[in-house]
Image (spheres, rainbow, N blue to C red):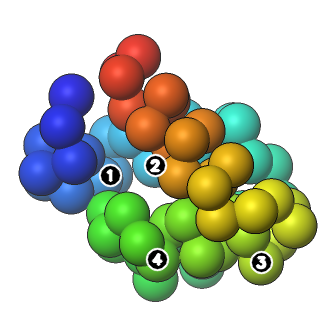
């Protein structure tokens, strides 16, 4: 799945992100609304991951959806 598809199906896929990054809140995911850069920023903020690690993990998860 590419990122355009993720944005279009955000309501269906956001649960996968919450499963992987449990510290993300429903409000965080509502604010992100499928925008990759904002999602990566929230993961950094909540989990303390580096930007590169968060981007890599997000991309890997997207590949398996």
Residue for point 49% across, 30% down = 61
Report how far apart the C-alphas of labels 4 and 2 lie in the structure: 13 Å
The answer to whether mark 1 and mark 3 are in CB contact below 8 A is: no
Marker count (numbered): 4
Q: Nearer the viewer, mark 4 or mark 1?
A: 4
Dot 2 falls on a residue whose secondary structure is: helix
Q: Nearer the viewer, mark 2 or mark 3?
A: 3
The picture places residue 6, in percent across and down from the top left corner, at 24, 46
Find residue 14 and name its label: 2
> Which disc, if any, is residue 11?
1
Marks 1 and 3 sit apart, C-alpha to C-alpha, by 22 Å
In contact (CB < 8 Å): disc 2 and disc 1:
yes
Q: CA distance from mark 4 to mark 1?
A: 16 Å
What residue lies at 36% left-to-right and 23% top-to-bottom? 63
Image position of 41 with respect to 6: above or below: below
- Indicate the secondary structure of the residue bearing disc 1: helix
Q: Which mark is residue 45?
A: 3
Q: Residue furthest top?
A: 64
Q: Which residue is mark 4?
A: 38
Q: Earlier in the sequence, mark 4 or mark 1?
A: 1
Q: Is residue 24 left or right of residue 52?
A: right
Q: Secondary structure at mark 3?
A: helix
């Amino acid at each position: 799945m590419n990122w355009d598809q993720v944005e279009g199906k955000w309501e269906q896929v956001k649960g996968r992100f919450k499963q992987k990054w449990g510290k993300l809140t429903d409000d965080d995911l509502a604010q992100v609304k499928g925008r990759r850069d904002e999602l990566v920023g929230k993961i950094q903020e909540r989990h303390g991951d580096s930007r590169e690690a968060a981007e890599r993990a997000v991309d890997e998860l997207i590949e398996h959806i």
